[in-house]
Amino acid sequence: MAITRKRERQLKRLRKSANKVIAEQRVVLDHANEVARAARGQLAQLTREQVGPTVRDVVDHRVRPAVASGIATAEHTVSSAKKTYDKNIAPAFAGAVGSVVGALELKKHPQLAKALSKASGGRIKAPRTGPGVGGYLLIGLGVAAVATVAYAAWQTLRADDDLWITDDSDDQD
């Protein structure tokens, strides 16, 4: 298929126009790159002067005190749990173990159990199996102590996203 001369001239003009537009676009892109380089330098300077100190200030005045407060709370909770364990749980557990050992010893000596049964008129019963009221109380106290320690650990180790939110009044200044 042959192209007419008129069509060839039109294509040639179009090619020249396209080349001219491409050259102009290159100039515009070069200028845009220069502006972007200058903006990048300004942004780096702004970051050094404004953002860095702001972040350091937030870390020093908000994050560190919050972490220190969380650690102090956890230490207090652990100390309180230890005191509760030492004061309430350990003695109750020791008393329960002593009662269980006494009951087991009584069960080992059937003659002693028979004699006690005769002496009390049959009111002494065989030791019960399974936990009683005291056992359930001890289990409850143990669960409470474990829950207290777990809650303290969770409070200490959780991510506190509120620490990273700036005040609205700071943004408006």
Image: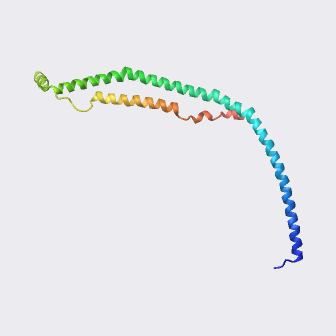
Q: Position of residue 130 (x, y in %)?
A: 25, 33
State the residue at coordinates (52%, 32%).
Answer: 157
Quadrant position of the C terminus in the picture: top right
Looking at this view, name the residue that lies furthest to the front.
1
**Vertical side of 14 occupied by 123: above or below:** above
Residue positioned 42% across, 31% down in the render: 147
Tell me which residue sits at (70%, 35%) in the image.
171
Instruction: Return the residue nearer the eye: 115 or 172.
Output: 115
Horizontal and vertical percent for residue 101? 24, 25
Rendered image quadrant of residue 55:
top right
Residue at the spot x=81%, y=49% of the render? 32
What colouring does the structure picture have? Answer: rainbow
Lateral position of residue 28 relative to residue 129, left or right: right
Number of dots carrying numbers: 0
Seen from the viewer's position, the closer of residues 17 and 60 is 17
Instruction: Classify residue 62 as left or right of residue 34.
Output: left
Residue 107 located left or right of residue 44: left
Quadrant including the N terminus? bottom right
Q: Position of residue 117 (x, y in %)?
A: 12, 24
The residue lying toward the viewer, choosing from 167 and 85, is 85
Residue found at the far bottom of this picture: 1
Judged left or right of residue 70, residue 2 is right
Q: Tell me where residue 164 sits by quadrant.
A: top right
State the image coordinates of residue 57 (x, y, percent, origin top left). 67, 28
The image shows residue 82, relative to residue 11, as above or below, that is: above
